[in-house]
Image: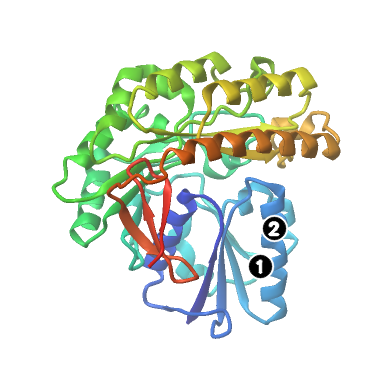
């Protein structure tokens, strides 16, 4: 069968996309026009993404394509997905995709048990970059997060399996390894290991390559800040730390059911800034239920004080089945105004941080080509570089 794969969302979903291609490698992946079937590897973190995916699904149905939806949406919004009368496959059941291609409309392939995805078939593309998923699920219970309903509780893959898979990728010519999970910092808590221990194993593999460590929640960084700092200092690890704080107000963090405080984030940033030229990235949600002007002012103050080079600003939208969906929602005009205000602050910080690179020569890792033909690369601190050739 000829298949078109339409994938959305985070790096974790990119890892699942390689599994989808691996499991269905006997089939041919083609353009939409050529395809008999469409597999949508879905994301439901934000309502805007969900709406975009639903519009795409309706389009594929109108073209007469067999549509299968995998990824997070089947569990994040099961009622809305069931109404589409298509085949659904949750993130724990990707190995059932061959059956899904033959299933009746309305069938839902679902499992409460995590598959050991690191041992499933993978099909990587021909780029120098590969994604390595190290665990499934998380240990958090954030009030706003629908992904927890899709991915479940933490299951870490063994260090041996992860390192062996990374070794096979490096031997095949991969130069950039993206370590990912729902929360990389939680890795190993359930199996007596840790993220720094795992990264030490991956970076011990012979070869010329770089590792990017994915999102790590602050509470896990603080379990052993010294070891985490040492991990980022490794010459094979990008000097890039993605540590989401979500709000600068401790009151809002408690409403979000987040673990930790704004001061914890300040402590982590202060320590990691000792690493020369490190890039700090974080995530902020504005307009969360109950956020006052004073709470928002604390968030702005935290960003101005810590100066993260990258800030992913999101306007809060409630997700089905989450605790936050039952809270009183803020007017959209307020969250929009706060999002614009914070984004202006962040752009100033980013612009200022980039000026120091004018005229600087550095070694970069070439990762691919842009649509206009220019060469894309990454600096040692994971900043995007565009080469005009």
Disc 2 secondary structure class: helix
The residue that mark 2 highlights is 81
Residue at image point 41% right, 78% down: 27
In the current view of this chain or complex, which residue is farthest to the left? 206
Q: Does label 2 or label 1 sit earlier along the sequence?
A: 2
Q: Position of residue 18 (x, y in %)?
A: 40, 61
Tags 2 and 1 touching, CB below 8 Å: yes
Closer to the camera, 77 or 361? Answer: 361
Determine the CA span between mark 2 and mark 1.
8 Å
Q: Is residue 365 above or below residue 328?
A: below
Residue 222 appears left or right of 83: left
| Point 45% across, 56% down: residue | 14
Residue farthest front in this picture: 359
Q: Is residue 160 visible?
A: yes
Residue 351 coordinates in the image, percent (x, y): 55, 40
Residue 324 location, quadrant: top right
Disc 1 secondary structure class: loop
Q: Is residue 370 above or below residue 212?
A: below
Q: Quadrant of residue 85?
A: bottom right
- Nearest to the observer: residue 45 or residue 280: 280
The number of callouts visible is 2
Picture disc at residue 86: 1
Q: How many other residues sit within 10 Å of disc 1, few (<14), some (14-19) or many (≥20)? A: some
Q: Is residue 224 above or below residue 342?
A: above
Picture coordinates of residue 335, whole percent (x, y): 78, 35
Is residue 85 at least partly visible in the picture?
no
Of 368 and 287, which appears nearest the observer?
Answer: 368
């Amino acid at each position: 069968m000829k298949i078109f794969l339409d994938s959305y969302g985070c790096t974790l979903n990119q890892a699942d996309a390689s599994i989808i291609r691996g499991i269905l490698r006997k089939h041919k992946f083609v353009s939409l026009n050529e395809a008999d079937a469409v597999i949508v590897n879905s994301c439901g973190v934000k309502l805007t993404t969900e709406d975009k995916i639903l519009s795409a699904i309706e389009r594929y149905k109108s073209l007469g394509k067999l549509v299968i939806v995998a990824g997070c949406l089947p569990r994040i919004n099961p009622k809305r997905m069931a109404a589409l009368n298509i085949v659904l496959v949750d993130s724990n059941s990707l190995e059932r995709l061959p059956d899904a291609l033959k299933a009746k409309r309305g069938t839902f392939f679902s499992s409460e048990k995590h598959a050991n995805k690191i041992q499933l078939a993978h099909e990587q593309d021909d780029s120098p970059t590969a994604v390595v998923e190290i665990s499934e699920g998380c240990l958090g219970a954030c009030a706003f997060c629908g992904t927890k309903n899709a991915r479940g509780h933490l299951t870490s893959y063994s260090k041996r399996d992860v390192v062996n898979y990374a070794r096979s990728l490096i031997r095949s010519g991969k130069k950039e390894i993206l370590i990912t999970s729902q929360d990389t910092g939680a890795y190993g808590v359930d199996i007596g290991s840790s993220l720094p221990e795992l990264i030490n194993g991956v970076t011990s593999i012979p070869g010329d390559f770089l590792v990017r460590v994915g999102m790590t929640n602050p509470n896990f960084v603080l379990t052993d800040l010294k070891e985490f700092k040492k991990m980022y200092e490794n010459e094979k690890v990008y000097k890039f730390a993605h540590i989401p704080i979500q709000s600068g107000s401790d009151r809002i963090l408690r409403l979000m059911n987040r673990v930790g405080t704004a001061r914890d984030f300040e402590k982590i940033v202060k320590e990691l800034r000792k690493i020369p030229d490190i890039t700090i990235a974080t995530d902020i949600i504005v307009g969360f239920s109950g956020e006052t002007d004073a709470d928002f002012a604390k968030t702005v103050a935290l960003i101005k004080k810590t100066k993260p080079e990258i800030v992913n600003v999101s306007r809060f939208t409630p997700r089905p089945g989450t605790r936050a969906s039952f809270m009183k929602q803020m007017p959209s005009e307020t969250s929009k105004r706060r999002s614009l205000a914070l984004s202006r602050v962040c752009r100033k910080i980013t612009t200022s941080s980039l000026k120091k690179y004018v005229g600087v020569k550095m070694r970069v890792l070439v990762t691919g080509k842009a649509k206009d033909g220019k060469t894309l690369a990454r600096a040692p601190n994971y900043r995007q570089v565009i080469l005009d050739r």
